[in-house]
Every structure is written in structure tokens, then in C-alpha cells.
Image (spheres, helix red, strand yellow):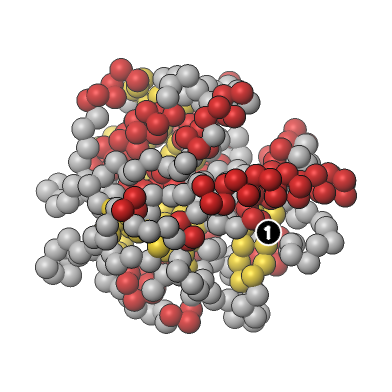
Amino acid sequence: MGLPKPLGPYAVGFADFELRRTEGVHGGIASGSALQNNSPDFVMLADAQGAPLIRIFYPTAHANRSSLPFDSATRWMPSIMYTWGYVSKLIRPASPMHRLAIWILTGIVHSFMWPNVLIQASPATPILTLGNNDEEGRLPVVIFSHGLWACRTTYSAFCCDLASHGYIVVVPEHLDGSANMASYADHNGNRKWLQNSFADVPIDQISMLDRAKQLKQRVLEVRKVVDVLESLDRGLLTQNSNTVTGRAGLEVSMLQNRLDLHFIAVSGHSFGGATSIVASGVDKRIKCCLAMDVWWEPVDKMEIEKLAGKVPVLLLNTENFDWKALRDARTMFMKARRDATQDGRPLVTVLKTIKGTSHQDQSDFTMLFPKIMKRMGVAGTLDPFVSKDINSRACLDFLHRYFLPPGTKGPYAVDVAEDSEHLIVEY
């Protein structure tokens, strides 16, 4: 059991990096209400400020994952704490009895997933070298923002598809309290855990004001990730600056002079889609946006015109993630894009909808648990592996057309002709 082989010609490597904190130095804005509990494993949201842990997917010249021996670092679930986070979405930890039930179910689920659910990437393998000079060796970057109740591995199939075509894909594990579980090392190097801020709160009781605060922090974290990438590319960080050790830890020198920071795109799903829209509108270092199933409601309606941005935007939607408030906000954004120009030319804005799909079809869940997701009513009618391929190819095609410079070397182009029957396209 596991995720499908990536679409592209390159095998994929991955590594984790977290910038070491120093005592008294915590960048960022902690927002929202944190979940109170007595467990020493969990921390309050305000304690989790700083640059987030990131997973980096990249093309490698190493053998394909399927031809390599088993490596525990390739497990889709990073640790049992993340399993706990997913299970707490199904059972709210509102009482000691509920929490006990969560731990029991976590043990059962994790014992199955831990050895069986793997990603199609190899830990800490050498990065691919494409050219003979410095500029040819640099690779474009895509920063991916995960959705609610997700983490840095939830969208591994999509990220591997992009990396297998020559992109470096960077996934921050957001510390705003929206992840199913997030981890960070404190200034003493101790690993801390931040569970979802609203795990014990019914979803209809969570205010959009709280979500807007989380969105603000998420955007700030994306911008911090760009700062970290700039430091890695320039060789300003030592190996000791990475709190992640073991097989999955990034060798920081590997990315020196390898990132094409003139070509940074941002992507994301759901809450991450909203994050990518806002980040691309406020950070001039970001040159393209791939926003999947954007959850528009946390975005301040008064700010939408300001967030129209100046970069190409792909809005890639599933068919069933649709209601009036969402459509109204999207229409407002599209109008703002039509009214704006870049150097006197209309902004590139493409809206695509994949027929027969539901919200979770843009994550790994429907591929890993197709029967369960069907029974829960959160999977579409289209085969999840087919929808994943269509989703990835649509993003790869948009990047090649509107993000990369003409004549770019490397296998970035994809054939999307076969997908037309599954897509509704609007410009």
C-alpha cells in the first residue's frame, strides 16, 4: 500500500529542515485560541512562534523509490503524534474519556499505517544536476501550503509529481494551529507538539475572525520560508542550524547555489489555497500562484481587490467544493483580476474545475483510503488516481506556460490533451 509513482521522468528525494531557534528569539505572530490540556507533550500556540519545519521534495539522480530497500523515513505518517492528530478530527478530545478513545484508535490505526503507507521518494539523496554551469544547475521553487487538519506529508503525491519534473517543492508545517499536528524544536532543542487549536470545538462555533488570524500567520510563515530558502541558497546556514537529524535531515550545503529564487511559485489546498492567494498578493518575490479549492471565507472581503496581485494565477477546483459564499468571493477576486493589469496587459487568470471530484481528491487521502473516503462521502466519482494525475498535469502545464521563461531546459512540459474531457475551463 502506498502512493503512486510520480508522473515525471526523475526520481524524487526529500529532506526536512527546521531553523534552530535561539532563546528569546521567536519571529512570527501567534494568533487564535490554543487548546488547553495538561499533557506535557503539547504546547500553547504562543510558544510555537518561529520559522516552521519544512519538508523539501526535489528531483534526484538516485534510483526510483520502488527499487530501493525499505527506509523508515519514507513513511507517510511522520510519527504516531500525527496519527493522533488525524484521529482527533474524528473524535473531538472534549473529555478524558474522549481522549482515551482517541489514543486507543490511534494505536490501532497507526499499527496499520506505520509500516504500510509509504511515499514515493527517498530521504536525503543527492539533488539532480541538470547543467554544467551555476545558472543551469538552479531549479525553480514551489512553496506548498497545506489545508486544515493536514501536515507536511498530506499532499506528498502532488509534491512528488512536481519534483519529478524538476521543481524543488517546499512544504511548511504551519504553526498557526490549523494543522492536524505540528512539531518544532524549542530553543533547548526539545521536540514540542502543537495540536489543532480547535480540536475540541464544533466547527460551526469557530469564528472567521479566528480563521483570519490564522491566515495572517500562515502568510507570514510562507514569507519566512522564502527567507530561509534565500539563506540556504547563499550558504549562510551551518548544519547545526537544522534541528532535524537522522536520515530525513537536510544536508544544508546541498541547496547552496541550487535554488532559482527568481522563480518562486506558491501553491496550496483549501486553507492553503487562501494562503497562496494572499501570499502571492503581498510578497513580490513570488511570481506565480497555483490555488487549489480555495477556501475564500477567511479572506477579508475588503482586501480582495488589494490581493488581486500581479502574478499569473491558476484556480483549480474540485466539482463538489462549491457553495454560494464561496462562489461570491471567487467572483469578486476574478473581477478584481480582470480590472487589474501588468505592464498594460491583462493578468493571466485561469479557472479550471475537475469533473466528478470532491475536496479531498486533491490530497493523498482518497488514494490511500478509497473505500473509507467513499463511505464517508468525501470522495468524488472519478477514480482518485486519475483525478490526481489531472490535477498535477494542470498545475505543471500552467507553470510551464506562465511561470518559467521561454526556452527553459528540462522536462517541465506535460501533455494535457487527454485531460480535456474531465475539465471545465474558464478564463
Q: Element at badge 1?
A: strand
**Percent coordinates x, y for residue 11 in the rendering:** 28, 53
User: Which of the 4 image quadrants contains residue 264?
Assistant: bottom left
Residue ID at (45%, 69%): 247
Q: How many numbered discs sit on the rendered protein? A: 1
Between residue 34 and residue 12, name the one nearer to us.
Answer: 12
Locate residue 404 relative to residue 301 in the image: left or right: left
Residue 298 appearing in the image: yes
Q: How busy is the neighbourhood of tag 1: few (under 14 within 10 Å), some, or many (20 plus)?
A: many
- Residue ID at (55%, 27%): 371
Residue 244 point in image, percent of width and height:
51, 71
Closest to the observer, 383 or 339: 383
Q: Nearer the viewer, residue 70 or 258?
A: 70
Residue identifier under label 1: 194
Residue at (76%, 39%) from the top-left corner?
91
Q: Nearer the viewer, residue 330 or 320?
A: 320
Compared to 21, does 54 lie above or below?
A: above
93 on left or right of 278:
right
Q: Is residue 379 left or right of residue 97?
A: left
The percent coordinates of residue 125 (x first, y second) are 33, 65
- In the displayed structure, 327 sits above or below 173; it is above
What residue occupies the far right of the structure in this picture?
96
**Quadrant of the image containing the C terminus:** top left
- The answer to whether any part of residue 49 appears in the image is no
Q: Position of residue 37 (x, y in %)?
A: 83, 58
